[in-house]
Image: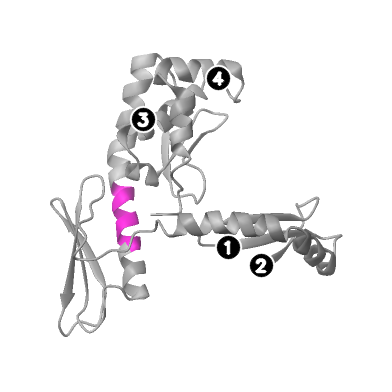
Amino acid sequence: MFQRSAKAKHVSIRIKPIEGVRVAVPTRVSFEKAEEFLRSKTEWMKRHLQSIKVQENKRTIYSQAQPFHTFKHKLQLQPVIGSIALKAKIYKDILLVTYPAHKSEADEEVQQFIRQAVEATYRLEAKAYLPERVAYFAQKFGFTYNKVIIKNTSTRWGSCSASNNINLNLHLMRLPESLRDYVVLHELAHTVEKNHGPRFWALLDRISGDARGLDQKMKAYRVAIF
């Protein structure tokens, strides 16, 4: 929970889904002082932890009874008698995950393996789809960029570097098409406007049709919850 940080200038609290509470403690501040600060924020933490719990409850529980699909693939779960290994493979439009028949599909180990297989599938889909989508919108609206990089970060859907590299999160493949396109347009707009000032929002609104409305809808999704 408490982490010593040479970069931190003051004690700060970060609450994230799945990861829980992390307190950054500057080198010049004692852990006793950090604990005192944490206690002073008890009510604030309670409110945020409740909100985080709501988000965590949205995490998918994978089962044979509940159909699930990624952007291009349908998940198929199959228990295998005599098997001791968890395996995943893709063929055609199927993501097949097999697991030992003596284990329940609700077992945390099985669920975590399925989640990793789903994430790997999103990565493949993102690499095939997102660069083409960036190229399409760049040509349509006259943007110039360097290259597209697919990443797996825990917080950001996308970013644009100073050299106009477009970094996109593989988890964009989970979003509705309108929001996926919005993030692509958001980062392309940053090739022209590097900050979030009025000119940036005016540009993004012009190319997306409803920048503020789409940005608000993005708040319903978290990278780490799927």
Q: Is residue 91 above or below residue 199?
A: below
**Can the viewer see residue 146?**
no
Which residue does the image show at 58% across and 59% down from the upper left? 49
Q: Which mark is residue 20?
A: 1
Helix, strand or loop for disc 1? strand
State if disc 1 and disc 2 touch (CB < 8 Å): yes
Q: Amino acid at mark 4?
A: Phe
Q: Which mark is residue 200?
A: 4
Q: Which mark is residue 1?
A: 2
For residue 15, side relative to residue 178 (left or right): right
Give coordinates of residue 51: x percent, y percent: 54, 54
Q: Residues within 10 Å of mark 3 (few under 14, many from 20)?
A: some
Q: Is residue 125 magenta?
A: no
Helix, strand or loop for disc 4? helix
Helix, strand or loop for disc 3? helix
For residue 155, side relative to residue 48 (left or right): left
Q: Is residue 116 magenta?
A: yes
Figure quadrant of the C terminus: bottom left
Give coordinates of residue 112: x percent, y percent: 36, 68
Magenta highlight range: 115-124
Q: Amino acid at mark 1?
A: Gly
The earlier-in-sequence mark between 2 and 3 is: 2
Q: Residues within 10 Å of mark 1 (few under 14, many from 20)?
A: few
Q: Residues within 10 Å of mark 4 (few under 14, many from 20)?
A: some
Q: Which residue is mark 3?
A: 181
Q: Is residue 59 above or below residue 81?
A: above
- Cα distance in 3D space between marks 4 and 2: 38 Å
**Can the viewer see residue 189?**
yes
- Cα distance in 3D space between marks 4 and 1: 34 Å
Q: How many marks?
A: 4
- Cα distance in 3D space between marks 3 and 1: 30 Å
